[in-house]
Image (cartoon, helix red, strand yellow):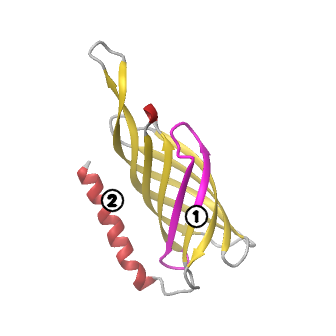
Amino acid sequence: MRAYTSAVFALVAFTLEALPVTAQDAKTVEVTPYVALGSAGASPVGAAVTFPVTSTLSVETDVAYRHGEGGIHALGSSVGLLYFLPRVGRSTSYVVGGVGLSQYGAPVFSSNGPPIGTEPRVALTVNAGGGLKVPMNEKLDLRTDVRWFKSFGRQGSEQFRVAQGLSFDVGKR
């Protein structure tokens, strides 16, 4: 698991290192708190921070919370690339893909078989999807995001999530 953590950290560090050099256009950092509906195990609340790299490419970090298996408070975090497609009217659609880490509860079994508790574990996850961003005013956008998540490990799983959030600009334009 340490190798996964180190690899994700290195990917995020190298990506964020290049941002100040390439983000010279008028775009700003956006923060998007969201609520979501999805399949079992999908996170219902979270926040995403989007850093523009070019006019069509952004790096997004995401932190999400869910009440996990066995009553654990499970956090998930990911980093991904958003590619914005050409505008249609006022709306902008995008595709996204990313990698991250997610907590889950692994059952602890007694010597005679039935589970007696839950132990928190961390799994590597990948995600892919897309969404639609509609401006409400100069600093506020309505964002709908649809994603598929796949976690790896002994108890790997798949989730599907539809999230709705409000994106607001942070900093100067």
Amino acid at circle 1: Thr
Disc number placed over residue 130 in the picture, else none: none
Q: Residues within 10 Å of mark 2 (few under 14, many from 20)?
A: some
Amino acid at circle 2: Val
- Residue drawn at the location 54% of the way across and 36% of the way down: 40
Of all residues shown, which one is farthest toward the right?
Answer: 89
- Is 13 situated left or right of 78 in this image? left
Where the C terminus falls, by quadrant?
Answer: bottom right
Q: Secondary structure at mark 1?
A: strand
- Is 8 situated left or right of 56 in this image? left
Q: Position of residue 25 (x, y in %)?
A: 53, 86
- Residue drawn at the location 32% of the way across and 22% of the way down: 109
Of badges 2 and 1, nearer the viewer stands 1
Q: Position of residue 105 (x, y in %)?
A: 39, 35
Q: Position of residue 47 (x, y in %)?
A: 53, 59
Of the pair 109 and 2, the residue shown nearer to us: 109
Taking the magenta stretch, the answer to whether it contains residue 46 is yes
Of all residues shown, which one is farthest toward the left?
Answer: 2
**Which stretch did the figure color magenta?**
33-56
Taking the magenta stretch, the answer to whether it contains residue 172 is no
- Residue drawn at the location 35% of the way across and 22% of the way down: 116
Placement of 115 over or under 61, stated as above or below: above
- Residue drawn at the location 50% of the way across and 44% of the way down: 66
Which residue carries the number 2 mark?
8
If you read the primary sequence from the N terminus, does the residue marked by circle 2 or circle 1 appear first?
Answer: 2
Disc number placed over residue 32 in the picture, else none: 1
Of the pair 2 and 151, the residue shown nearer to us: 2
